[in-house]
Image: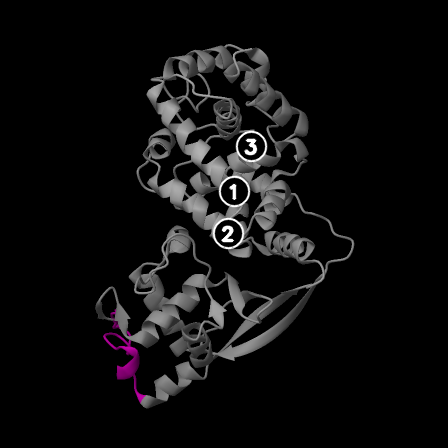
Amino acid sequence: MENTIPSDYELTDEEREDLQQSVGFEEIPIRFRNQDFDVRGLVQRMKSEDILIPRIGLRNESLEMNAFQRGFVWNNRQMDSFVESLLLEYPTPSIFLVQQNDRRLIVLDGQQRLETLRVFYSGIRKDRKYRLHLPGSKFDGLSYDELDDKYRRLLDNTYITTTIITPSPSNPERSYEAIYDVFARLNSGGAQLTAHEIRLALYNGDLMDSIDLVNTTCEAWRTLYGSKEPNKRFRDHELILRVIAMYLEGDAYRKPLATFLNSFSSKYRNGGHSAVQDALCRYRLAAKLLVESGHQFPLSIPGGRQINTAKVDSVLVGLMSALSHGDISAAFVNSCLSKLEGDNAYLEAIGRSTSDEQQVVTRITLAKKVFAGE
């Protein structure tokens, strides 16, 4: 299996496997209902925060977009085309919402459509008057408040179908895993979401925010990842979650990886747990040591340049574990990396079937021993 991080929007083999491995509940503790909302009602519900688009990181309400949306931010043409489609009474795909305990609805799928409507109704996009740019269309150059009354009413009263998913209050963790499973099965569009993008919506909260802070502000991690800018598909964010989960609860790891990460995300969703915060601090220290070691491409397979996800979790978990027992020099880290890269058993464990329990145990155990000086 190829475990390197691609530079484009294609899903990796590992990401496809995450989506294909269903949980397989005999009884799904969730309910579904279809509900039609008029466009104006959807916009009003977003204004009153009865409908919420998940957010991580940036929470400045004056910002048009937030960090969660960086993977699929529509350009002007896509936004204008969507509004025009509604004005032309063309059909639009359903939106998926998840009902919370307080009855608010979290957007699981349909963020860009809803955000486009919110911005169009507000009349402002990036500090400028939002007018449609549709050459040859009768709507070209018009803002919402400049539409003829006929078309403004048509847009206001256009209904969009939503599928509302309600978890079981008696078993929320199992319910959210079931929601993940259902959406992973339905998630087959052209811009297919990764398992982690679904996870970010379902388990949005302080844990994801804390990881995003490390992901965006830890200079050493950005250097190791090979990009100053966060990954548009949140692969860098998922890697940190993966390391923290393996570091804290790796002994309980069972395949599939996606389910393990979902359970961890549910358990630590509020993110205030001291163990998580301590682990994130140790993650920063480990990343800094890896950079200072001077080892070329410390998170890649020998001879390669791209990050190898299995090497990431094992090296960082091993180094973080060693740091819990005292300081380590950069020179020692460099020698440890060289030792691991010369170990055929370790190379096998990061090279194929990397989500299998035995492969996970093998590579992390070997990394821990090497960084412990054994």
Answer with mark 1 or mark 3, whichever residue precedes in sequence.
3
Q: Nearer the viewer, mark 2 or mark 1?
A: 1
Q: Which residue is mark 3?
A: 247
Q: Quadrant of the C terminus?
A: top right
Drawn side of residue 252 relative to residue 246, left or right: right
Task: Report the magenta residues as a range.
Answer: 130-148
In this rendering, the answer to whether 159 lies above or below 67 is: below
Answer with mark 3 or mark 2, whichever residue precedes in sequence.
2
Q: Which residue is mark 1?
A: 274
Q: Nearer the viewer, residue 192 or 118?
A: 118
Q: Examine the rendering and report whether any part of residue 5 can be seen.
A: no
Drawn side of residue 180 relative to residue 150, left or right: right
Q: Nearer the viewer, residue 184 or 213?
A: 213
In this rendering, the answer to whether 344 lies above or below 247 is: above
The amino acid at mark 2 is Leu
Q: Which residue is mark 2?
A: 200
Residue 43 location in percent, x, y? 42, 75
Q: Tell me the CA gap for discs 3 and 2.
A: 20 Å
Residue at (35, 84) in percent of width and height: 152
Residue 161 location in percent, x, y? 54, 73
Q: Label 2, secondary structure: give it.
A: helix
Residue 297 location in percent, x, y? 38, 22
